[in-house]
Every structure is written in structure tokens, then in C-alpha cells.
Image (tube, helix red, strand yellow):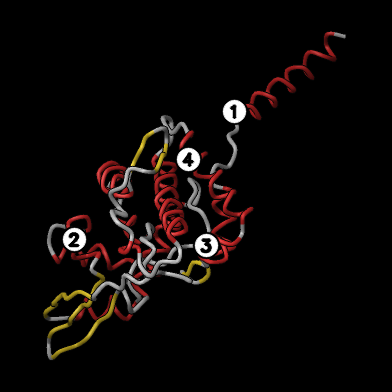
Amino acid sequence: MKRVWIPILLVCLTQCSALAMEKPDIHGPWNQIISTYVRDGSVNYRGLKENQADRQKLDAYLDGLCKADISAFSGEQLLAFWINAYNAFTIKLILDHYPVRSIKDIPNAWEQKIWCAAGTRLSLNDIEQIKLRTELKDPRIHFAIVCASKGCPDIQNRAYRADNANQMLDDTARLFFRQPKNFQTKKSGSTLILHLSQIFQWYGNDFGKTDKERIAFMLPFLPKDAAAAIAAAQKIEITYIEYDWSLNGT
């Protein structure tokens, strides 16, 4: 009997231990929400506002972010956690003040320490400036966090996760440089003028200390024709596209 049951018992214990160690998909509810209410970078705030069950799902997700233990998270897990948190908190902020024409109409939208993540009270600025820019130091986050404005990068309709964070960040960077609101080129004599989103004006040093370094950062993500034009240019000038702060949805 012992020869029969001991191996079975060991298999059971191994499988049960593995199941116990598995963590639930913390970002699953967020993925369900944005896959329903985000299309082509536009958020259906009204639809979400009017759906009590989905608002409760969002609130439950935010509560899960507050209770999350991220002490053993990998870099990819942290990127996913803080990008999702920033975007979810921003949508919640808009819903709490909806209808609103712009996030800038909300007093101290980025400074209010009204959000809880990983057991800590934070503002949107805290997440962007400390958690993402200072601690994780990945400039691609500027193409992923969305400030509820048309001038922002398009919000994606799926959640960032550890297993897709790097690929999604590359994809959002490529999308960013395909959109005229963020990137345009114009030839003026022997000079190539790059019209860039003001993100590159406000956070330029995140992408490089000089214009040359910033352009080098952009090159892998640019459309082929734009990259070729830059390579062939005798002189390059940079100007900035005025940011559109109107709401990124209805």
C-alpha cells in the first residue's frame, strides 16, 4: 500500500503547493474594463459611468491595487503594475468628475494624494515622477501612461502584464510615432524639421541629454520613411506640437 499511495501523495502535494503559490491575475478586471470601453484610444466614459456593475468592478480592481504586495515583483511586473495603476486612477478621476471637458478642469488633478497602491497613498504625479521615471527609468512609459487627453498617447484596450510589458511598450512607441499628433516631418531646403509631441519638450532628458541622443532613441520606433529622411538629412531642427488637453473620449 505504501508503494502505491506515497507517489500519489507526493504528486498531490506538489500540485497543491504549486496551485497555492500561483497568484490571481490582479489586472484581469482592468483588462475587462478597458477592452469594453476603449476603442482606438478613445474612452467611453459615459458608458462606464452608467454601468454600475462595471464601475463596481473598477472599484474592486483599485482596492486590489491598494492591497497588493509588490515587494517581490520583477521589473516587468512593476512596470505593468504602475502603468495600469496610473491609467486606472486617471479614468476613475474622470468618472468622479464626469461630465468634464478636460482633466485640467479638475483642481489639482495630478497632485491629490487620493490614490492607494501597494499600501501607500499616492498622487498621479507620485506614480509618474517617482515610481516610473525615477525608480524604473524606462522612457517608453511616456507612451503608455495616459492623462485622459487627446494630446496624450492613445490608451490601449488591454492591460499591461509582466509577460507582455516590454512588447506592449515597444508597440505603443511605434504607434506613437505613426500619429501626426505626436510626430511629423517637414523638409525646408536642406533642413529636416521634426515636429514632436510636447512630451519631448517636458521630459526631454528621459530620452537623451542632447537632440542627437533623443533622435537616436526614436529611430528604432519610427516609420521607415521617417528614419530614412533623418539619416539623409544635412541638418535637423526640432519644434513641438501644441498639446491638446481636451478629453480623450465621450
The amino acid beneath tag 1 is Met
How much space separates mark 1 and mark 4, taking CA atoms? 19 Å
Query: Which quarter of the rendered picture does the N terminus lie within?
Result: top right
| Image quarter of residue 213 | bottom left
Outermost residue toward the bottom? 189
- Mark 2 highlights which residue? 204
Image coordinates of residue 14 in percent, x first then y, are 68, 23
Position of residue 20 relative to residue 150, above or below, is: above
How much space separates mark 2 and mark 3, taking CA atoms? 27 Å
Image coordinates of residue 122 in percent, x first then y, are 34, 41
- Mark 4 highlights which residue? 65
Image coordinates of residue 7 in percent, x first then y, are 77, 17
Outermost residue toward the top? 2
The amino acid beneath tag 2 is Gly
Label 3 vs 4, first from the N-terminus? 4
How much space separates mark 3 and mark 1, taking CA atoms? 29 Å
Residue 169: image tag: none
- Mark 1 highlights which residue? 21
Characterize the local packing of mark 4: few (<14), some (14-19) or many (20 or more) Cα atoms within 10 angstroms. many
Q: Are marks 4 and 2 in contact (CB under 8 Å)?
A: no
Characterize the local packing of mark 3: few (<14), some (14-19) or many (20 or more) Cα atoms within 10 angstroms. many
Q: Nearer the viewer, mark 3 or mark 4?
A: 4
Label 2 vs 3, first from the N-terminus? 3
- In the rendered picture of this protein, how many numbered marks are placed on residues? 4
